[in-house]
């Protein structure tokens, strides 16, 4: 009898990390929750010009709290931040949080992306979806593509849904030996083109609605170079880099900063005024490690996760996926 070995190459390859999605297909939106084991150290780096976040200041060096209970990634633009309320409720019921006297306050950072132009209007992630995502959380390989926070993602939406390419949520992990792992989970909703491993455009603004060729966002930016009010595009790439390395809060922030290199490798251009690019770092503290090595391979995991998210996405709401 042959036994199949399933390799987990996603964020849940980090022991103790669990991930849960909630997806609303009609609304083309959703949320994704990352639940952390106790004593997980958090960090963050926000690069985009239009971020929508919560609790990011708390994660910066010099501020009090070091440990994180969960991270929320959600669609719905700023409306989607309310999904973290459900995650707070879930964690409080399980006494997961920062002790303040007789109370426990869950530490739940989060970030949102703009997916309002796709799907039925008025449907957004809410507190109940956040709670349900926690209930669905598992340490199984993370489902990728048009699920959770990746449901309503687009790439190159500057000319509308018909010429955009479907984005999604992707994940990847890298085994550094002796049980040390770094992994990423990224929701890909970029203004810029997603590039493949050879630097060619994998997803972006299509030349025509039915075309499989792309304009190239850098070409469009050249046309807009002297325009003071270029066409707006509401986008964001948000995600998590996790590791079982032992990192301080300062080192976790350093890793988050380095991880953005992977975003820039896979998306061109990145960190625009219309992006809210945000990466969180989670370090569970099991293995001594060099923070620069974790950051370097974290960037590699981010680039791979971005490409996976696009490749596994499905057409939805008038936005065509890469393979369809």
Image: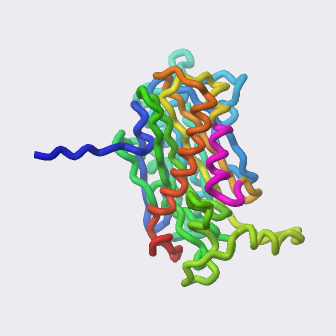
Where does residue 165 sit, x and y in percent of width and height? 56, 70
Task: Pick whichever, 116 or 236, lies toward us.
Answer: 236
Residue projecting furthest to the top: 101
The residue located at (67%, 63%) in the rendering is 191
Q: Nearer the viewer, residue 55 or 322?
A: 322
Q: In percent of the image, x 70 and y 34: which residue is there?
A: 57
Q: Is residue 235 left or right of residue 86?
A: right
Dominant SS type (magenta): helix
Q: In front: 129, or 63? A: 63
In the orientation shown, which residue stands out farthest toward the front? 198
46, above or below 292, in the image: below
**Residue 15 drawn above or below residue 131:** above
In the image shown, does 33 or 265 lie closer to the viewer? 265
**Residue 105 x %, y %:** 54, 27
Q: Position of residue 113 (x, y in %)?
A: 61, 55
What coloring was used for the rendering?
A: rainbow
> Which stretch is magenta?
256-270
What residue sits 63% from the left and 25% below the top?
249
* Quadrant including the C terminus: bottom left
101 w.r.t. 220: above or below: above
Decide if residue 89 is on the left or right side of residue 4.
right
Does the magenta run of residues contain 264? yes
Count of numbered circles on the image: 0
Residue 187 placed where, x, y %? 54, 53
Q: Residue at x 81, y 74 (%)?
A: 223
Q: Is residue 259 magenta?
A: yes
Relative height, residue 209 to residue 311 (above, below): below
């Amino acid at each position: 009898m042959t036994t199949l070995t399933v390799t987990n190459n996603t964020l849940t390859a980090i022991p103790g990390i669990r991930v849960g999605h909630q997806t609303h297909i009609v609304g083309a939106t959703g949320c994704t929750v990352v639940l952390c084991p106790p004593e997980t150290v958090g960090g963050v780096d926000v690069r985009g010009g239009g971020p929508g976040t919560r609790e990011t200041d708390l994660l910066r060096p010099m501020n009090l709290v070091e440990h994180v209970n969960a991270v929320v990634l959600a669609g719905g633009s700023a409306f989607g931040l309310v999904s973290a309320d459900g995650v707070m409720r879930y964690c409080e019921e399980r006494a997961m949080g920062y002790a303040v006297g007789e109370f426990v306050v869950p530490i739940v950072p989060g970030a949102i992306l703009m997916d309002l132009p796709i799907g039925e209007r008025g449907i957004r992630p809410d507190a109940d979806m956040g709670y349900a995502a926690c209930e669905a959380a598992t340490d199984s390989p993370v489902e990728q593509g048009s699920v959770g926070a990746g449901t309503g993602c687009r790439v190159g939406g500057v000319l509308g849904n018909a010429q955009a390419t479907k984005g999604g949520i992707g994940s990847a992990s890298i085994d550094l030996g002796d049980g040390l792992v770094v992994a990423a989970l990224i929701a890909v909703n970029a203004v810029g083109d997603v590039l493949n491993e050879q630097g060619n455009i994998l997803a972006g603004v299509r030349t025509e609605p039915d075309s499989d060729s792309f304009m190239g966002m850098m070409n469009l930016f050249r046309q807009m170079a002297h325009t003071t009010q270029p066409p707006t595009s509401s986008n964001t790439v948000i995600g998590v880099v996790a590791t079982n390395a032992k990192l301080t809060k300062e080192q976790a922030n350093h890793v988050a900063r380095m991880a953005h290199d992977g975003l820039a490798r896979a998306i061109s251009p990145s960190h625009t005024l219309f992006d809210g690019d945000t990466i969180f770092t989670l370090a569970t503290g099991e293995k001594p490690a060099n923070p620069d090595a974790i950051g370097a391979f974290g960037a590699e995991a981010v680039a791979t996760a971005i490409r996976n998210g696009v490749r596994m996405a499905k057409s939805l709401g008038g936005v065509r996926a890469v393979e369809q």
